[in-house]
Image (cartoon, grey):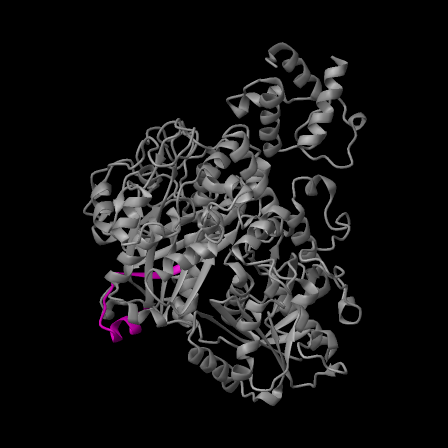
Amino acid sequence: MEELILKLKNEIIEVLNLEDIKPEDIDANAPLFGEGLGLDSIDALELIVLMEKTYGIKIKDPNEGKDIFKSVAAMADYISKHRTK
Amino acid sequence: MRLWITGSGIVSALGVGREATLRSLLESRSGIGTVRFLQTEHTEFPVGEVPMSDEQMEHLLGIAQGTPTTRTSLMGMLALGEALEQAQLTRDDLRKVAFVSGTTVGGMDRTEQYWLDLLENDKHNEFISTHDCGACTEMIADHFGAFASVTTLSTACSSAANAIIYGARLIENGVADIVVAGGAECITKFHLNGFNSLRILDTTPCRPFDATRTGLNLGEGAAFVVLESEAHALSRGVKATISLDGYGNACDAFHQTASSSDGEGAFRAMTEAIRNAGLTPSDISYINAHGTGTPNNDSSESAAMQRVFGSHIPPLSSTKSFTGHTTSASGSIETVICLLAMNNSFIPPNLNFNDSSDCVAPVAKLVEGVELNHVLCNSFGFGGNDSSLLLSKVKPASESRQASVSARTNAFPRPIYVLSAQHISAQQPFSRDWMQNPVRYAEPFVRSIEPDYKPFIPPMESRRMGRLLKRALAVSKSALAESGVENPDIIVTGTGLGCLENTQLFLDALCREGEYLLKPTHFMQSTHNTIGSLIAINMGCHGYNATYAHGSISFESALHDAMLQLCNTYHTTALVGSHDEMTPSYYNLLCKSGFLGNPGEMASECSVSVVLGENSRGNALCAIKDMVMLYQPSSNQLKQAVESLFSRNGLTSHDIAGILSGFNGSEGSRKDYCDHCGELFGDIPMLHYKHLFGECYSASALSMYVAACCLAERTIPQALYVTPSAEPVSISEHQALVLYNNDGKNHSLTLLTAV
């Protein structure tokens, strides 16, 4: 799981172009949206693309993403249970 | 001044022409269905396609097979033809008619079809020059003859509404007697996939304002209206039943793709339109809502209508349930639908509506036999470019109310002051070093010199901005800081190709990897108005906001709009800029088309922002006294334009220190400028700047910047003389500079004086 969390942090930094942020700056349990990293609705759409492209997980309803993208740890947990790639 | 609508034409999923459209509306028959013409894998999304193939439209228009066209321009021609015919305008009349069209997609349908060929071979090179928005407008116009001027607005889904507003201003300011304005846009895979990446498309017929709505259906089409003053129409014996009595344009300044929850921009646009017409909210008999069917738009628009009308919201409907969302054309398509409703006394229904539990309730069934005296037509675009038009029935003169629009004075042109001017270009950014020590290049294509953006843009904001957005924001902030104007009243932006890098990333992914998993961040930046709206969002500027995308005259178009407003409205300051970037592969395409890469010239990129004020505040760089734009003038017309520019400003050739021309060193450019300069300008010295700054669609903005520097410093550097001068020449107090740009079709003359 630790390995997946680190991989995921790097992928988030890359797809969201988070200049100046390093994996260790992201708290795996901190909220990604609103507070914490302060991501918004467009970032959520980018994360949906990331989930499908990299892990083969389709998220049909963006509202579903709210729980999945609560934190990096939550994402990793969801991925480990649902990945098809 | 009352603006009459003396002609209209329309093409949409409801058919070609007013008659077909009217029939569908009265029969409550939607044009939305399964995709037929667009070659897409996304057949799950219903669309509102114009029920004709490109070939059928070409045939109807009498266009020879093999002529390069775009679907946008074909639909535009059909609509324009109908509008001209109703207004009784023939080919011979067009010389005094201005044409203003809105589009965002332009020729993208052909570009996406041939993109990989364009990059890799020479099979379809004829479709390089049909890509940009301005080229589409010119194609539509040229089918009918020689218009006096052509202009392209590009504010995403409010483009056509803003084209009509600019058209109205041209007449109110005495710049044109007759204007044909509207918009055209075909469906492309590019924006179908873009909207899909934003997850705002519905897989079932759209349900605007319904609580179960989940998104929009894309539509396509074109519509134009002919505007002229009542007096002018009467003088040539034409009549009208509907007038354009008011309009409002405001910026939501909230988010690139989402509307604010309280609908601030929409509220301001509707309020301004009603006030502008001298009416009150209770006068409105029907609202044709923007009503896209997305959860966000309809709740935001509902909130705005509740703020404007309180508990007395007039009957409203979204006719996007008939046509689909016709994006850039929606403003004019829905204006013509309003004309049909007003003339035939009915309210078109909002189809597929059942559940009013979270929005205002629209009219769900056709209502007939209702008199519609004053109608609001809403059009909102990405970036919060929100506009509203107010249409009224023309009453017999005896009953006629005095519209407040008539209070406007015919004050254009008068001096408008350049309070500051900044650039990021091939020369040192934010610096006038080029006047003494210009950077010299030998390469045919150079990128702009990028400054450090961190002082201007925090990293969390800049991460989603391509190079051009960063540049545009930094240069705008820098110009505003220099001028001392914190929040400009209006923001008007020009761009030839918009955020090309991100547009191309989206296009590459679409063509190489297919129609799935495309990045919303790239799509968001592909609309031309991303730049102007980003600036507004950043400054919290809710004022007028518009973007012009017409090749080499994008900047002049933006400048002209700003000048008209500063001369003639309560606005006192304007941020005007033009911004373009170039990618290596698009540079190669433009070399193949002959626009760039010619011996003697250098291609580059630039962002320029100027802050204009209607008073000088004691520290202006120079004044803009006058400007003229002409489309394909004869040499005689051009000569007359120059003479009249000088004489009406009381100037002789001795008062002009130089003609700052767009000469770029190539042979073609020598023909466009140098061969005629003696005839046009006598012995006034010819100046140039593109050998230092490079050629690009926004280059004419650099001519404004360069001239402002010269006039502020009262000197013309030696490097600017086409025929070298031994010494730098000083500019005396009353001397002027003329900017002359000519792209082979569009000519502009701008008169600047020292202050």
Judge whether residue B61 can be spotted in this image. Answer: yes
Of B232 and B743, nearer the camera is: B743
Check residue B379 for magenta coloring.
Answer: no
Q: Is residue B468 left or right of residue B64?
A: right
Relative height, residue B7 to residue B358 (above, below): below
Rendered image quadrant of residue A26: top right
- Spot the residue most to the top: A81
Q: Position of residue B29 (x, y in %)?
A: 24, 36
Q: Is residue B540 left or right of residue B389?
A: right
Q: Position of residue B433 (x, y in %)?
A: 79, 67
Check residue B232 for magenta coloring.
Answer: yes
Judge whether residue B372 can be spotted in this image. Answer: no
Of A19 and B616, nearer the camera is: A19
Q: Position of residue B653 (x, y in %)?
A: 58, 88
Relative height, residue B717 to residue B299 (above, below): below
Relative height, residue B58 to residue A73 (above, below): below
Q: Is residue B552 left or right of residue B141?
A: right
Relative height, residue B309 to residue B690 (above, below): above
Total number of numbered labels?
Answer: 0
Image quadrant for the N terminus of chain B? Answer: bottom left
The magenta-colored residue range is: B229-246
Q: Residue at x 51, y 76 (%)?
A: B413
Q: Is residue B107 left or right of residue B498?
A: left
Q: Position of residue B239 (x, y in %)?
A: 23, 66
Rendered image quadrant of residue B435: bottom right
Rendered image quadrant of residue A64: top right
Image quadrant for the C terminus of chain B? Answer: bottom right
